[in-house]
Each structure stands twice: as structure tokens, then as C-alpha cells.
Image (cartoon, rainbow, N blue to C red):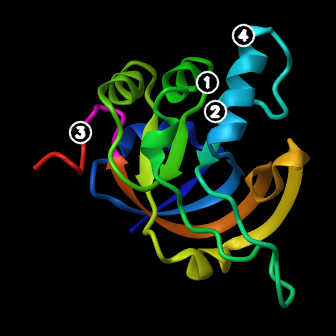
Amino acid sequence: MVSINTNDLSALQNLKVGDEVELSGTIYTARDAAHKKLIAMLKSNTKLPFDINGAFIYYAGPTPAKNGMAVGSIGPTTSSRMDIFTPTLIENGLRGMIGKGNRNDDVINACIKYGAVYFCAIGGAGALYSKFVKKATVIAFEELGCESIKKLEIENFPLIVGIDSKGNNIFVH
């Protein structure tokens, strides 16, 4: 198990496909509709709601918090739905993505070119993942409800490196 902080971008270059990681630090949630809005903002030179440079995005829309938790269930959504947007975000500084499932060649090539890493979370484990979220704040697109962009503070969030910064891919047999 490798412990990584989202502030230590140099550590991403040492990760290998299949590595088990405990991620701590700041990440942001964003799904399809939020990605579409982010790309529109980039195209119109509008300031994004968070600094994309060095950022990590979790493809998730957490359910409302219960019993003093920061979030409710926060399982990953299918990452390929974001593939049309992801290379542009990586080119603009995104360095970590968290989701489930394989990515297309454009995303893999962007990971190689810019040193980004794709982490896999386990579908169906959303209730478990909520225990690793210490704080959650809606920062953009509140009208999207659970799919708004949230800033999360996480601690020891368990993940697997699905695609490393060299383009090695856990989904290739």
C-alpha cells in the first residue's frame, strides 16, 4: 500500500499500474454535466470554480450526508462518460482522476503526455468510501444537485492505479 497526498504530484510519477494507494488531501467531484460546464468555461476563458492545475477529480455524485458524516454514499460512476472532456482538462492541469472502468486512447495518451494518473474505485463500495471523506463543500453548479462540484477533504481513500503516467493500463489483458 502506497500513501499519497494530492499535494505531492511528483509521487504520481512513481506509481505503477495495479498499485494499491491510500489517497489523502483535496479532490473534487464532477460528473458529465459538470464536465460539460467546465469545458465551456475553458473555451470562453472563464475562471474555473477551482484551480485545475494539479487537481484530482472523482467521478461521483454523493448522496446526502447522514449521521454526522461529511457525505452519504459516494461510489464511482463510469469514467468513459467523461472521456470526451478529459484530455482537455488534463492539458489544462488535471493530474488525477478517480472512477471505474476503462478509458479511451485519447485519455491514455494525455496521461502519458502530461503525467496524469487514473485511479480506480470499486463500484458498489460507496457507503464504505464515505467513511474516508472528512469534509465536503459544494463549490459550483449547485443546480445540478448531487452532481454539483464538491470540494472533498479525504484521508486514506483506498484506490488502485488503473492507468499510470506511462500509459500502462490495468484493463489490457
Q: Secondary structure at mark 2?
A: loop
Q: Secondary structure at mark 4?
A: helix
Q: Quadrant of residue 157?
A: bottom right
Could you give the CA–CA distance between mark 3 and mark 1, rounded to whole angstroms?
A: 20 Å
What's under tag 2, amino acid-wise?
Gly
Q: Which circle's residue, 3 or 1, is located before the other in the chain?
A: 1
The residue pinned by badge 2 equals 54
Q: Which residues are magenta?
A: 163-167
Q: Which dot marks residue 168?
A: 3
Q: Around disc 4, counting alpha carbons within 10 Å, would you say few (fewer than 14), some (14 to 19), or many (20 or more)?
A: few
* Most foreground residue, 6 or 63: 63
Give left or right: position of 69 versus 81. right
Asked which quadrant contains residue 24, the reply is bottom right
Report x, y in % for residue 161: 36, 53
- The Cα atoms of the two marked residues, 2 and 1, are separated by 6 Å
Q: Amino acid at mark 3?
A: Asn
Amino acid at the residue labelled 4: Lys
- Residue 34 is situated, as x and y percent measured from the top left of the image, at 72, 38
Quote the CA–CA distance across marks 2 and 3. Answer: 21 Å
The answer to which of 59 and 33 lies nearer the viewer is 33
* Quarter containing the N terminus: bottom left
Q: x and y percent of residue 159 in the render?
A: 45, 63
Q: Does residue 72 appear left or right of residue 58 in this picture? A: right
Amino acid carrying mark 1 in the image: Gly
Label at residue 93? 1
Mark 2 near mark 1, Cβ–Cβ under 8 Å? yes
Q: How far is disc 3 from disc 4 in space, using C-alphas?
A: 30 Å
Q: Secondary structure at mark 1?
A: loop
Q: Circle 1: is it few (<14), some (14-19), or many (20+) Cα within 10 Å?
A: some
Q: Mark 2 or 1 closer to N-term?
A: 2
Mark sitting on residue 43: 4
